[in-house]
Image: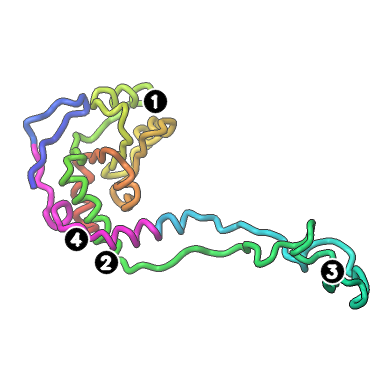
Amino acid sequence: MEVKVISTKGKATSKSVNLSDNVFGIEPNDHAIYLDVKQHLANRRQGTHKAKERAEISGSTKKIKKQKGTGGARAGSIKSGTRVGGGRIFGPRPRNYHFKLNIKLKRLARKSAFSYKAKSEDLWVIEDPKFDAIKTKDFKAFIADMKLENEKVLMILGEQNDNVYLSSRNLKKVKVVTADSVNTFDVLNAGKVVMAQSSIEVIEKILN
């Protein structure tokens, strides 16, 4: 698959790159995508939720009233979950939501996500951006030149570039990642996927 390279000023250049059909042109597997996104969102959960149950509530342990002869239901503790101020019945406890997926399935999911973006022409290849300093104003100008101000953008770099990353960090609709850390959720969650030219080789090497 041949794609034109766009300059950092948003203009088409005479250069083009060939994207591997094994990564950017496969028949997408929706179930692999579902599992990978499900795992990603599950792994982001802290799992620190906690409610006190009757054994953890402070209060008297005295039997409220005698067992028989009152005409009402028997009651033994003010900490019962059926009473106001009592413990929660089967309340949430801290837990780990992580689950395992095979690496081949995760690679298939990322290939499927990239293939969807390539098919819908929401995947762009640009020249590697170079920032002399950490300036959000410069990054906003770069996004404006690309005419992506109203898009949710995922930018994929070939390697860590602190000037680019830190310049974009305050922008809500922009996320900058390196090619070796991109995941299925980020690709699908973005309106436009903007790949630096140097990132293509890294992604194809990882996913092939």
Dot 2 amino acid type: Lys
When the figure is inspected, residue 78 is found, relative to residue 122, above or below; the finding is: below
Residue 136 marker:
1
Query: Are the residues tagged 3 and 2 within 8 Å (C-beta)?
Result: no
C-alpha distance separating marks 1 and 3: 61 Å
Occupied quadrant, residue 174: top left
C-alpha distance separating marks 4 and 3: 63 Å
Q: Given this view, does label 1 or label 3 mark the residue nearer the observer?
A: 3
- Which of disc 2 and disc 4 is earlier in sequence? 2
Horizontal and vertical percent position of residue 64: 90, 68
Judging from the image, what secondary structure is the residue with disc 2 in?
Answer: helix
Range of residues picked out in magenta: 16-38
* Residue at image coords 22%, 50%: 114
Q: Which residue is mark 4?
A: 208
Dot 1 amino acid type: Thr
Q: Which residue is mark 2?
A: 104
- Which of disc 4 and disc 1 is earlier in sequence? 1
- Which of disc 2 and disc 1 is earlier in sequence? 2
- Which of disc 3 and disc 1 is earlier in sequence? 3
Horizontal and vertical percent position of residue 202: 23, 51
Dot 3 amino acid type: Ser
Horizontally, residue 109 falls left or right of residue 40, namely left
Occupied quadrant, residue 99: bottom left
Residue 77 marker:
3
C-alpha distance separating marks 1 and 2: 38 Å
* Along the line of sight, the residue nearer the viewer: 101 or 127: 101
Dot 4 amino acid type: Asn
Horizontally, residue 67 falls left or right of residue 164, namely right
Query: Are the residues tagged 4 and 3 within 8 Å (C-beta)?
Result: no
Q: Given this view, does label 1 or label 2 mark the residue nearer the observer?
A: 2
